Image (cartoon, rainbow, N blue to C red):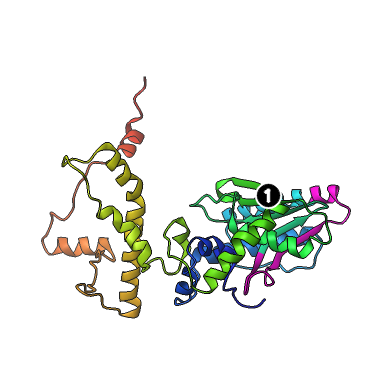
Protein backbone atom coordinates (compact mmCIF):
# COMPACT_ATOMS: atom_id res chain seq x y z
CA UNK A 1 0.00 0.00 0.00
CA UNK A 2 2.49 2.60 -1.15
CA UNK A 3 1.65 6.11 -2.35
CA UNK A 4 -1.82 7.60 -2.26
CA UNK A 5 -5.09 5.73 -2.72
CA UNK A 6 -7.27 7.00 -5.55
CA UNK A 7 -10.34 6.41 -3.37
CA UNK A 8 -9.02 7.35 0.08
CA UNK A 9 -11.08 7.10 3.28
CA UNK A 10 -10.33 10.76 4.09
CA UNK A 11 -12.01 11.89 0.87
CA UNK A 12 -14.75 9.25 1.05
CA UNK A 13 -17.59 11.66 1.86
CA UNK A 14 -16.64 13.94 -1.01
CA UNK A 15 -16.52 11.03 -3.44
CA UNK A 16 -19.93 9.72 -2.41
CA UNK A 17 -21.54 13.19 -2.50
CA UNK A 18 -19.79 14.32 -5.70
CA UNK A 19 -18.45 11.27 -7.60
CA UNK A 20 -16.84 13.11 -10.57
CA UNK A 21 -14.68 15.14 -8.17
CA UNK A 22 -12.17 12.27 -8.06
CA UNK A 23 -11.13 12.61 -11.69
CA UNK A 24 -11.41 16.40 -11.49
CA UNK A 25 -9.02 16.60 -8.52
CA UNK A 26 -6.48 14.37 -10.24
CA UNK A 27 -5.74 17.27 -12.58
CA UNK A 28 -4.26 19.23 -9.65
CA UNK A 29 -0.93 18.64 -7.87
CA UNK A 30 -0.76 17.52 -4.25
CA UNK A 31 0.11 20.37 -1.90
CA UNK A 32 0.59 20.25 1.86
CA UNK A 33 -0.54 23.30 3.81
CA UNK A 34 1.19 24.39 7.05
CA UNK A 35 -1.92 23.20 8.91
CA UNK A 36 -1.62 19.73 7.37
CA UNK A 37 2.09 19.64 8.15
CA UNK A 38 1.42 20.56 11.77
CA UNK A 39 -1.27 17.87 11.91
CA UNK A 40 1.16 15.27 10.59
CA UNK A 41 3.69 16.28 13.25
CA UNK A 42 1.04 15.95 15.94
CA UNK A 43 0.03 12.50 14.75
CA UNK A 44 3.66 11.38 14.73
CA UNK A 45 4.08 12.47 18.35
CA UNK A 46 0.86 10.72 19.36
CA UNK A 47 2.02 7.51 17.68
CA UNK A 48 5.34 7.72 19.53
CA UNK A 49 3.73 8.29 22.94
CA UNK A 50 1.19 5.47 22.57
CA UNK A 51 3.83 3.01 21.35
CA UNK A 52 6.03 4.05 24.26
CA UNK A 53 3.15 3.27 26.64
CA UNK A 54 2.76 -0.11 24.95
CA UNK A 55 6.48 -0.80 25.59
CA UNK A 56 7.32 -0.83 21.87
CA UNK A 57 10.66 0.36 20.55
CA UNK A 58 10.14 3.73 18.99
CA UNK A 59 12.01 6.92 18.21
CA UNK A 60 10.80 10.31 19.40
CA UNK A 61 9.94 12.50 16.39
CA UNK A 62 11.37 15.98 15.89
CA UNK A 63 9.53 18.85 14.24
CA UNK A 64 9.60 22.64 14.10
CA UNK A 65 5.82 22.55 14.52
CA UNK A 66 5.92 21.30 18.10
CA UNK A 67 4.69 23.88 20.60
CA UNK A 68 3.48 23.57 24.17
CA UNK A 69 -0.09 24.05 22.99
CA UNK A 70 0.14 21.35 20.32
CA UNK A 71 1.85 18.87 22.64
CA UNK A 72 -0.80 19.48 25.30
CA UNK A 73 -3.50 18.64 22.76
CA UNK A 74 -1.65 15.46 21.75
CA UNK A 75 -1.34 14.47 25.44
CA UNK A 76 -5.13 14.74 25.83
CA UNK A 77 -5.63 12.43 22.85
CA UNK A 78 -3.04 9.94 24.13
CA UNK A 79 -4.62 9.91 27.58
CA UNK A 80 -8.00 9.08 26.05
CA UNK A 81 -6.49 6.23 24.04
CA UNK A 82 -4.73 4.78 27.08
CA UNK A 83 -8.09 4.68 28.84
CA UNK A 84 -9.60 2.77 25.91
CA UNK A 85 -6.67 0.35 25.82
CA UNK A 86 -6.98 -0.45 29.51
CA UNK A 87 -10.74 -0.92 29.24
CA UNK A 88 -10.25 -3.35 26.34
CA UNK A 89 -7.71 -5.28 28.41
CA UNK A 90 -10.32 -5.68 31.14
CA UNK A 91 -13.00 -6.85 28.69
CA UNK A 92 -10.82 -9.16 26.60
CA UNK A 93 -7.92 -11.50 27.31
CA UNK A 94 -6.20 -10.70 24.03
CA UNK A 95 -7.38 -7.35 22.60
CA UNK A 96 -6.03 -6.02 19.30
CA UNK A 97 -4.36 -2.63 19.50
CA UNK A 98 -3.32 -0.91 16.28
CA UNK A 99 -1.53 2.45 16.22
CA UNK A 100 -1.50 4.20 12.83
CA UNK A 101 -2.92 0.99 11.38
CA UNK A 102 -2.82 0.46 7.61
CA UNK A 103 -6.33 -0.47 6.47
CA UNK A 104 -7.19 -1.76 3.00
CA UNK A 105 -10.55 -2.38 1.32
CA UNK A 106 -8.95 -3.56 -1.92
CA UNK A 107 -11.20 -6.62 -2.21
CA UNK A 108 -14.25 -4.33 -2.06
CA UNK A 109 -13.02 -1.19 -3.83
CA UNK A 110 -10.18 -0.88 -6.28
CA UNK A 111 -7.37 1.27 -4.88
CA UNK A 112 -8.96 2.04 -1.50
CA UNK A 113 -6.71 2.12 1.55
CA UNK A 114 -5.65 4.47 4.34
CA UNK A 115 -4.28 4.74 7.86
CA UNK A 116 -6.50 4.65 10.93
CA UNK A 117 -5.04 6.68 13.80
CA UNK A 118 -6.05 4.19 16.50
CA UNK A 119 -7.87 0.86 16.50
CA UNK A 120 -8.82 -1.02 19.67
CA UNK A 121 -10.63 -4.36 19.32
CA UNK A 122 -11.99 -6.39 22.21
CA UNK A 123 -14.04 -9.58 22.19
CA UNK A 124 -17.13 -7.97 20.63
CA UNK A 125 -16.34 -4.39 19.58
CA UNK A 126 -14.13 -2.49 17.17
CA UNK A 127 -13.26 1.03 18.31
CA UNK A 128 -11.88 3.43 15.69
CA UNK A 129 -10.40 6.62 17.19
CA UNK A 130 -9.42 9.56 15.00
CA UNK A 131 -7.36 12.59 16.03
CA UNK A 132 -8.32 15.94 14.51
CA UNK A 133 -6.01 18.82 15.40
CA UNK A 134 -7.94 21.55 13.59
CA UNK A 135 -9.46 24.41 15.56
CA UNK A 136 -11.98 25.82 13.12
CA UNK A 137 -14.52 23.16 12.14
CA UNK A 138 -16.21 20.77 14.56
CA UNK A 139 -16.16 17.20 13.21
CA UNK A 140 -18.71 14.66 14.44
CA UNK A 141 -18.43 10.90 14.50
CA UNK A 142 -22.06 10.22 13.52
CA UNK A 143 -22.25 8.87 9.96
CA UNK A 144 -18.60 9.89 9.49
CA UNK A 145 -17.70 8.26 6.17
CA UNK A 146 -13.95 8.22 6.76
CA UNK A 147 -14.30 6.35 10.06
CA UNK A 148 -17.00 4.06 8.69
CA UNK A 149 -14.61 3.01 5.91
CA UNK A 150 -11.89 2.30 8.47
CA UNK A 151 -14.38 0.36 10.60
CA UNK A 152 -15.46 -1.70 7.61
CA UNK A 153 -11.85 -2.45 6.69
CA UNK A 154 -10.97 -3.56 10.23
CA UNK A 155 -14.14 -5.65 10.38
CA UNK A 156 -13.08 -7.43 7.18
CA UNK A 157 -9.57 -7.88 8.54
CA UNK A 158 -10.30 -9.08 12.09
CA UNK A 159 -13.93 -10.14 12.08
CA UNK A 160 -13.00 -13.80 11.82
CA UNK A 161 -10.87 -13.59 15.00
CA UNK A 162 -13.39 -11.82 17.22
CA UNK A 163 -17.17 -12.04 17.54
CA UNK A 164 -17.73 -8.42 16.58
CA UNK A 165 -21.25 -7.05 16.93
CA UNK A 166 -20.52 -3.32 17.35
CA UNK A 167 -18.30 -0.75 15.67
CA UNK A 168 -17.65 2.39 17.71
CA UNK A 169 -16.35 5.53 16.02
CA UNK A 170 -14.76 8.40 17.94
CA UNK A 171 -13.48 11.81 16.87
CA UNK A 172 -11.09 13.53 19.29
CA UNK A 173 -10.56 17.28 18.77
CA UNK A 174 -8.57 18.22 21.86
CA UNK A 175 -7.86 21.80 20.82
CA UNK A 176 -11.55 22.67 21.02
CA UNK A 177 -12.32 20.11 23.74
CA UNK A 178 -14.62 18.15 21.43
CA UNK A 179 -15.08 14.40 21.80
CA UNK A 180 -17.72 12.74 19.62
CA UNK A 181 -18.62 9.03 19.67
CA UNK A 182 -21.14 7.08 17.60
CA UNK A 183 -21.95 3.38 17.37
CA UNK A 184 -23.21 1.28 14.50
CA UNK A 185 -23.85 -2.45 14.50
CA UNK A 186 -21.46 -4.60 12.51
CA UNK A 187 -24.40 -5.85 10.46
CA UNK A 188 -25.54 -2.34 9.54
CA UNK A 189 -21.99 -1.34 8.61
CA UNK A 190 -21.65 -4.32 6.28
CA UNK A 191 -24.94 -3.42 4.59
CA UNK A 192 -23.79 0.20 4.17
CA UNK A 193 -20.55 -1.00 2.66
CA UNK A 194 -22.36 -3.19 0.13
CA UNK A 195 -25.26 -0.88 -0.75
CA UNK A 196 -23.71 2.60 -0.46
CA UNK A 197 -19.93 2.58 -0.37
CA UNK A 198 -19.10 0.03 -3.08
CA UNK A 199 -21.43 1.36 -5.80
CA UNK A 200 -20.56 4.97 -4.90
CA UNK A 201 -16.84 4.25 -5.11
CA UNK A 202 -17.24 2.44 -8.42
CA UNK A 203 -19.05 5.47 -9.83
CA UNK A 204 -16.35 7.85 -8.58
CA UNK A 205 -13.48 5.77 -9.95
CA UNK A 206 -15.22 5.66 -13.33
CA UNK A 207 -15.78 9.42 -13.34
CA UNK A 208 -19.55 8.98 -13.48
CA UNK A 209 -22.36 10.76 -11.64
CA UNK A 210 -23.24 14.40 -11.11
CA UNK A 211 -21.19 17.23 -9.63
CA UNK A 212 -22.67 18.47 -6.37
CA UNK A 213 -21.52 21.41 -4.25
CA UNK A 214 -21.72 21.34 -0.46
CA UNK A 215 -19.68 21.37 2.73
CA UNK A 216 -17.70 18.43 1.34
CA UNK A 217 -16.03 20.92 -1.05
CA UNK A 218 -13.94 22.38 1.79
CA UNK A 219 -10.80 20.34 1.02
CA UNK A 220 -11.38 19.67 -2.68
CA UNK A 221 -8.36 20.67 -4.78
CA UNK A 222 -10.69 21.92 -7.53
CA UNK A 223 -12.79 24.12 -5.25
CA UNK A 224 -11.40 27.41 -6.57
CA UNK A 225 -12.36 26.81 -10.20
CA UNK A 226 -15.14 24.20 -9.96
CA UNK A 227 -18.06 25.28 -12.13
CA UNK A 228 -20.69 23.41 -10.08
CA UNK A 229 -19.57 25.19 -6.92
CA UNK A 230 -19.53 28.56 -8.68
CA UNK A 231 -23.04 28.03 -10.02
CA UNK A 232 -24.26 27.09 -6.53
CA UNK A 233 -22.96 30.31 -5.00
CA UNK A 234 -23.92 32.52 -7.91
CA UNK A 235 -27.56 31.50 -7.45
CA UNK A 236 -27.64 34.07 -4.64
CA UNK A 237 -26.63 36.87 -7.00
CA UNK A 238 -29.24 35.72 -9.53
CA UNK A 239 -32.17 35.65 -7.11
CA UNK A 240 -35.36 36.97 -8.68
CA UNK A 241 -37.34 38.76 -6.01
CA UNK A 242 -41.10 39.04 -6.40
CA UNK A 243 -43.05 42.30 -6.04
CA UNK A 244 -43.10 44.47 -4.04
CA UNK A 245 -39.66 45.92 -4.74
CA UNK A 246 -38.53 45.41 -1.14
CA UNK A 247 -37.36 41.98 -0.11
CA UNK A 248 -39.48 39.99 2.30
CA UNK A 249 -38.21 38.83 5.68
CA UNK A 250 -37.91 35.31 4.28
CA UNK A 251 -35.78 36.51 1.35
CA UNK A 252 -33.49 38.52 3.66
CA UNK A 253 -33.12 35.45 5.88
CA UNK A 254 -32.12 33.42 2.80
CA UNK A 255 -29.47 36.00 1.89
CA UNK A 256 -28.11 35.98 5.45
CA UNK A 257 -27.92 32.18 5.46
CA UNK A 258 -25.72 32.20 2.36
CA UNK A 259 -23.81 35.46 2.69
CA UNK A 260 -20.93 34.14 4.78
CA UNK A 261 -20.42 31.15 2.50
CA UNK A 262 -20.61 33.39 -0.59
CA UNK A 263 -18.05 35.81 0.89
CA UNK A 264 -15.68 32.99 1.79
CA UNK A 265 -15.98 31.47 -1.70
CA UNK A 266 -15.27 34.86 -3.33
CA UNK A 267 -12.21 35.34 -1.09
CA UNK A 268 -10.95 31.85 -1.98
CA UNK A 269 -11.27 32.56 -5.72
CA UNK A 270 -9.54 35.94 -5.30
CA UNK A 271 -6.66 34.38 -3.34
CA UNK A 272 -6.29 31.62 -5.94
CA UNK A 273 -6.25 34.12 -8.83
CA UNK A 274 -3.74 36.37 -7.05
CA UNK A 275 -1.44 33.44 -6.27
CA UNK A 276 -1.56 32.26 -9.88
CA UNK A 277 -0.67 35.76 -11.08
CA UNK A 278 2.23 36.19 -8.65
CA UNK A 279 3.70 32.69 -8.68
CA UNK A 280 2.87 31.43 -12.18
CA UNK A 281 2.64 34.83 -13.96
CA UNK A 282 -0.87 34.04 -15.16
CA UNK A 283 -2.72 36.92 -16.79
CA UNK A 284 -6.43 37.25 -16.09
CA UNK A 285 -8.54 39.03 -18.77
CA UNK A 286 -9.31 42.60 -17.72
CA UNK A 287 -6.94 42.56 -14.73
CA UNK A 288 -3.30 43.35 -14.21
CA UNK A 289 -0.94 42.82 -11.31
CA UNK A 290 0.22 46.08 -9.72
CA UNK A 291 2.80 46.72 -7.05
CA UNK A 292 1.13 47.27 -3.70
CA UNK A 293 1.73 50.34 -1.60
CA UNK A 294 4.28 49.87 1.17
CA UNK A 295 4.49 51.88 4.39
CA UNK A 296 7.85 53.64 4.62
CA UNK A 297 9.59 53.84 8.00
CA UNK A 298 12.53 55.76 9.39
CA UNK A 299 15.49 53.53 10.17
CA UNK A 300 16.57 55.85 12.99
CA UNK A 301 14.01 58.44 14.21
CA UNK A 302 16.50 60.25 16.48
CA UNK A 303 18.95 60.88 13.63
CA UNK A 304 16.16 62.10 11.35
CA UNK A 305 14.86 64.48 14.04
CA UNK A 306 18.36 65.84 14.71
CA UNK A 307 19.01 66.42 11.00
CA UNK A 308 15.64 68.14 10.51
CA UNK A 309 16.20 70.45 13.49
CA UNK A 310 19.67 71.37 12.29
CA UNK A 311 18.11 72.29 8.95
CA UNK A 312 15.76 74.68 10.74
CA UNK A 313 12.61 72.56 10.81
CA UNK A 314 11.06 72.54 14.29
CA UNK A 315 7.41 71.58 13.76
CA UNK A 316 8.19 67.90 13.14
CA UNK A 317 6.27 66.16 15.98
CA UNK A 318 2.56 65.30 16.30
CA UNK A 319 0.63 65.05 19.55
CA UNK A 320 -2.36 62.75 20.08
CA UNK A 321 -4.61 61.90 23.03
CA UNK A 322 -3.69 58.68 24.79
CA UNK A 323 -6.08 55.73 24.48
CA UNK A 324 -8.92 54.89 26.90
CA UNK A 325 -7.10 51.96 28.50
CA UNK A 326 -3.98 54.04 29.10
CA UNK A 327 -6.09 56.92 30.44
CA UNK A 328 -7.82 54.57 32.89
CA UNK A 329 -4.46 53.28 33.99
CA UNK A 330 -3.29 56.87 34.52
CA UNK A 331 -6.37 58.16 36.38
CA UNK A 332 -7.86 54.99 37.79
CA UNK A 333 -11.33 53.64 37.00
CA UNK A 334 -14.39 55.44 38.33
CA UNK A 335 -15.45 54.06 41.67
CA UNK A 336 -19.16 53.29 42.10
Classify the position of the N terminus by image quarter: bottom right
10 Å crowding of disc 1: few (<14), some (14-19), many (20+) = some
Residue 110 in the image: above or below residue 10: below
Q: Nearer the viewer, residue 249 or 288?
A: 249
* Residue range highlighted in magenta: 86-115
Please give left or right for residue 274 compared with residue 6 in the image. left
Q: Nearer the viewer, residue 93 or 236?
A: 236
- Whether the magenta-drawn stretch holds residue 129 is answered as no
Q: Nearer the viewer, residue 333 or 16?
A: 16
Mark 1 highlights which residue?
A: 184
Q: What residue lies at 48% left-to-right and 76% top-to-bottom?
A: 26
Count every numbered label the image shows and give the total. Answer: 1
Residue 74 is situated, as x and y percent measured from the top left of the image, at 64, 55
Q: What residue lies at 31% left-to-right and 41% top-to-bottom?
A: 253
- Most extreme residue toward the right is 93
Residue 333 is situated, as x and y percent measured from the top left of the image, at 35, 28
Tell me, yes or no, if residue 230 can be seen here. Answer: yes
Amino acid sequence: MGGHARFSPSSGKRRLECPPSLLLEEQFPDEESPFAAEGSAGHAMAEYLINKYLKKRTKRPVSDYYSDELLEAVDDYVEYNIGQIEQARKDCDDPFIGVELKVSLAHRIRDCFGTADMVVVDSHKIHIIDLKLGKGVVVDAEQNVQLMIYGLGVLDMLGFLYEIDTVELTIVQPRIEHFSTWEISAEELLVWGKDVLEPGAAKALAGEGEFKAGDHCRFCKARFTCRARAEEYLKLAQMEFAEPALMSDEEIAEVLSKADALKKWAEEVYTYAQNEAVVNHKEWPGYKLVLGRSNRKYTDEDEVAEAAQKAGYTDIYKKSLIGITEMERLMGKKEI
